[in-house]
Image: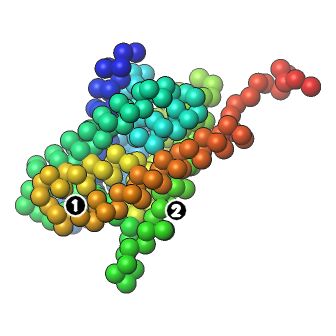
Amino acid sequence: MSLNRCLFAEFLGTFLLVLFGCGSVVTNEVFDGAVTLVGVALAFGLIIMVVIDTLGAVSGAHINPAVSVGLAAAGLFQWKRVVPYVAVQCLGAFAASYFHAEVIVPERPSTLAATVPRTVDGDFREAESWTVEFTLTAILMLVILRVATGPKERQAGAGLTIGMTVACMVLAFGPVNGASMNPARSLGPAVGALVAKDYGVAAPALTSLWIYWSAPFAGAVVATLVWRACLRDGPPADDAQP
């Protein structure tokens, strides 16, 4: 598949992820909890399933810089394509967040689904958020590696499996720190708020980006090492060497 087609698919896929996933958070804020946490989790899970099933055959539907790096570290993706993929993923996330800022909430208070650590007595729980992001991304990456490299029957359900994994994680840990697991998803609202001059949202979101970039990348790479050592499919038992 040509690089340009892949890049367009990654831009579109990440745009849709943030438009509908983060959009559910924005709508929940603007309309006084109408969506609920369960609705937000389902919105993320369902749109990921749709994007994977629709665009997976074009670009792989990474829609996440950490996933692109993890797949490259696993030898399943070309390193030379990582930077272009990450760039368009971030652009797609920003475009969707800017849409939220300018169309959905131009005159209403909203966090734009920005991810920041929770606060306790006025202090950000940064270590807690880093640990959550690292752990969740590692688990997500292991799931992706298993379904992406398994038999066709397992790959056929990749969209549902990955989407529901993300939904479970958002449902369980969303209130803790946003459960991003995706550097582009965290960057989009932060930059969108900055460009829209909503500095009350942009400042803490930008300050916290180091968590939402370093932890997912670290989690994805560690997951790759675990997959290589323990969970990679081997030859059938009949074909194993004595």
Image check: 74 left or right of 92? right
Amino acid type indicated by mark 1: Ala
> Is residue 91 in view?
yes
Judging by the rendered image, the residue that carries numbered circle 2 is 131
Q: Residue at x 30, y 34 (%)?
A: 88
Q: Which mark is residue 77?
A: none
Marks 1/2 in contact by CB < 8 Å: the verdict is: no
Amino acid type indicated by mark 2: Thr
Q: Quadrant of residue 177?
A: bottom left
> Is residue 169 in view?
no
Q: Residue at x 28, y 43 (%)?
A: 93
Image check: 155 left or right of 236? left
* Residue 82, x across and y down, in percent: 42, 32
Which residue is at the front of the view, 102 or 164?
102
Q: Residue at x 52, y 55 (%)?
A: 134
Q: Quadrant of the C terminus?
A: top right
Q: Residue at x 49, y 68 (%)?
A: 128
Image check: 35 left or right of 242? left
* Secondary structure beneath label 2: helix
Please tell me which of labels 1 and 2 falls first in the chain. 2
Judging by the rendered image, the residue that carries numbered circle 1 is 202
Whole-number angstrom distance, CA of label 1 to CA of label 2:
23 Å
